[in-house]
Amino acid sequence: MSDEMVATRASETTNGSAQQVDVAVVGAGFAGLYLLHRLRKAGLTAVALDTANDVGGTWYWNRYPGARCDIQTIDYSYTFDPELESAWTWSEKYATQPEILRYLGFVADRYDLRRDIRFGTKVTSATWDDKTARWELATDNGAPVSCRFYIMATGCLSAPKPPEIEGVKDFKGDIYFTSRWPHDEVKLAGKRVAVIGTGSSAIQSIPVIAEQASQLTVFQRTPNFALPAHNGPAPQDRATLLNSDRAAYREQARWSLTGVPYPQQTAVSWQLSEDERRERFEKAWAAGDLVYILTQLWADQGTDTAGNALLADMIREKIRGIVKDPETAAALSPHDHPFGAKRPCLDTNYYATYNRPNVTLVNLRQEPISAITATAIKTGKRTFDVDVIVFATGFDAMTGAITAIHPIKGRGGKSIADVWAHGPQTYLGLTVAGFPNLFLITGPGSPSVLSNMAVSIEQHVDWVVDRLSALREAGFTAMEATETAQDGWQRHMADCATLTLHRLANTWYTGANVPGKPQGVMPYTGGVGPYRSICNEIVDQGMLGFRLTGANGAAQCNDGEIVRLQPDVRLVLNMLADMKLPPLESFGAQGARDFIAQFNAQRPAGRPVGEVADGTLPGNDGPLPYRLYRPATPGPHPIVVYFHGGGWVLGDEQSDDPFCRDMCRRTGMIVVSVGYRHAPEHRFPTAAEDGYAATRWVADHAAELGGKAGPLLVAGWSAGGNVAAVTCQLARDRGGPEIAGQLLVCPVTDCTFDRPSYNDNATGYFLTRSLMYWFWDIYCSPADRTDPRVSPIRGKLAGLPPAYIVTCEFDPLRDEGIAYGDALAAAGVPVEQLKAHGHFHSSFTMVDVVITGVNGRVAMAKALRRFAGLPEEIGQDEAARNVPPREMNAAAG
């Protein structure tokens, strides 16, 4: 809109009183426009306010040279109206800023949205009035606004970050910001230009500026990974997939992890040969698709440093192959963050631009800027005469557009800036406790910038407008998140962050780009689809975590936490629930064994170790199979005798293979996994006696196995934890062997079922109360169940080796494991307990499926090393030697 039209619209709304609406929206970009459309369809009056003179939001302001989206435009589009999709055709795979702006203008015209937008208007304050249950907004242009609901559709990258360099005001040449590029043409031909920063906007603009300027000097503090966009027409395969079934394509995007319909990758890096990894990488490099290269190479690229290093090394190799000057190539190659932990950029000839004779890179790590004068930029080594400075220094991301634009005061006059002084606190990234009827579209705590924003915006808008309609129908006028729900969401956010490598980088995702800003991973890292399902669950559970209020004291509060499980545990359990399996006990013993064997075969293989060897040893009454895992380091090594889980009925020496490999790698010890005999063929006390006999044999043959002479360690999970605990008692009572320590993971320790965890976790967590009844009935008659060889908590506990006991929050066996640890400590046995929040019975043995179990497994390995008299941490030399040849490349990255 022209300035004259904006001024006319403002004067029309100035009549001395506040403009009364149901909903006020700040922002007229992707989110603001869709909000107006949905609110109007819901019968709610609304006004949008925007400081710009027309629609576009981020794309109105970000018009620097080379500005494009980095999600393919067939995905970066509205999907709410199939007719709209048919009415607009994108000209390129990655649309330019002018085309995206035209698209948003087309949408505004198609749905006649401008009539509800006040352009050129800034909200200067927003205050909640408890008496009227309304938000009162002051503006700098036209009438104030009074609204029932206040929605921030301000975008995540819309508050520019000011430069942090002394002397900027002294510069006499032209200064531009990529975040606020002039709307009139900027002529750079024949000029000496400096670009400060190498983030997304710089990487896109530098090649274009280099073609115009007589000299371009790029000042880089932190290099970023960039990938070729290979822009052009929309890829035919994607277009065909979309057009063949548009509804299915869009629905798949909504439930995907990123908002783009790619499947979840399952192959892990160490399962692939070097040639296979190279083939996948070259395909991704040629595809020019950011989401593809971030998600489709191997499953551990975003969660494991070694898997990530393989990919990062190949990108650095590409940089060296493109940039001719080795010193420049080295400076452009990131080494300070994992690939993907900081948003990579799509580029067109970015690295090749540094081969131009008129382009110079200044590495600010080696020569920081010392001053900006009237005509130059000085470092400690050189002076660069410049006519133009372009600051590509980014944004106060995610929170800046909420806290820095205007004061927002909620219940009791609390300022959101004060409430967020130590970092943003939200429920779902949508609401904030203490701020009734305030909604944030793609705010901190939602998938937001880690997703296809178009998909996330539509999901947020639909959820919010549907809730407003439901409030009206139920007779309520206000909704507000509870502190309990918000605190629980922050814990879930932290749990999700441990799954990814984002926590290892200083980026705008974490607020590290703004001096003094509290740091933490701000976007939700659990994925678009899982987030959508959580939002739906909140509604299904009666608005869990919200307090609803209305006229005449009407109130409803359904307090609680929506997610208590670890995010990957939740995914595993949802997958099992979707399979709709009959109870495991209904299969019968052999059928259950066959099912578990089939299930285990589909799990990712464990990491390679130095050597894996199978053998047999004499048990209490016949041979027992074992599998030995030996580190790659020279021996002799301490030995851990390990007993698998399975309720004394299921499993074998191979069934916990990934866990045994993990312990071998993390401890630098030999792990001998023993296949003891099972019920119903071999009932109590067979498993106990086999465990003791195997431990005694391993002790007697330690040297032959490559182990150190002296005390052993024992470990076990579930029923195997029971066997390990019983073995320690038998070894003490029968004169050996000497055991230095015991690791008991979710152990069975007692025959009673009256502890709270049996009721709290009776169903829904794979190991159920009825399954435990079944295991006990098959293995042991009621008359024998108080025998310490099956209920070790009922035995003599003094004089046992030190113990490390792991229990999981969502496990029927939780309380008896804790009780056993407490009883050992009361008997004078040194005990440490790990009570794993959000985990279930199988968490720690599902290596590389339940990634949030890593910290627990690290703690277990440290405990075993302490028991063996070794330093907790494996030394660097030992760690380097403890990698098989095939893994050396991964470790070196």
Image: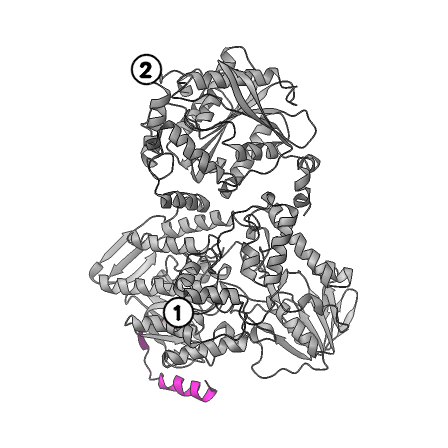
Circle 2: element type: helix
Q: Quadrant of residue 363?
A: bottom right
The magenta region covers: 1-24
Depicted 543 relative to depicted 69: above or below: above
Expressed as whole percent of the image width and height from the top left, the position of residue 19 reads 33, 78
Q: For marks 2 and 1, give the CA distance.
A: 71 Å
Side of 443 where 412 appears, left or right:
left
In the image, 109 versus 520, the foreground residue is: 109
Depicted 65 relative to depicted 753: above or below: below
Residue behind mark 2: 783
- Which residue is found at the position 41% from the left and 18% from the top? 682
Circle 1: element type: strand
Expressed as whole percent of the image width and height from the top left, the position of residue 171 reads 69, 77
How busy is the neighbourhood of tag 2: few (under 14 within 10 Å), some, or many (20 plus)? few
How busy is the neighbourhood of tag 1: few (under 14 within 10 Å), some, or many (20 plus)? many
Expressed as whole percent of the image width and height from the top left, the position of residue 287 reads 59, 62
Q: Quadrant of residue 416?
A: bottom left
Please state, as top left, top right, bottom left or bottom right, where the N terminus lies in the image.
Answer: bottom left
Which is closer to the viewer, label 2 or label 1?
2
Q: Which mark is residue 126?
A: 1
Residue 814 highlighted magenta (yes or no): no
Q: Is residue 69 visible?
A: yes
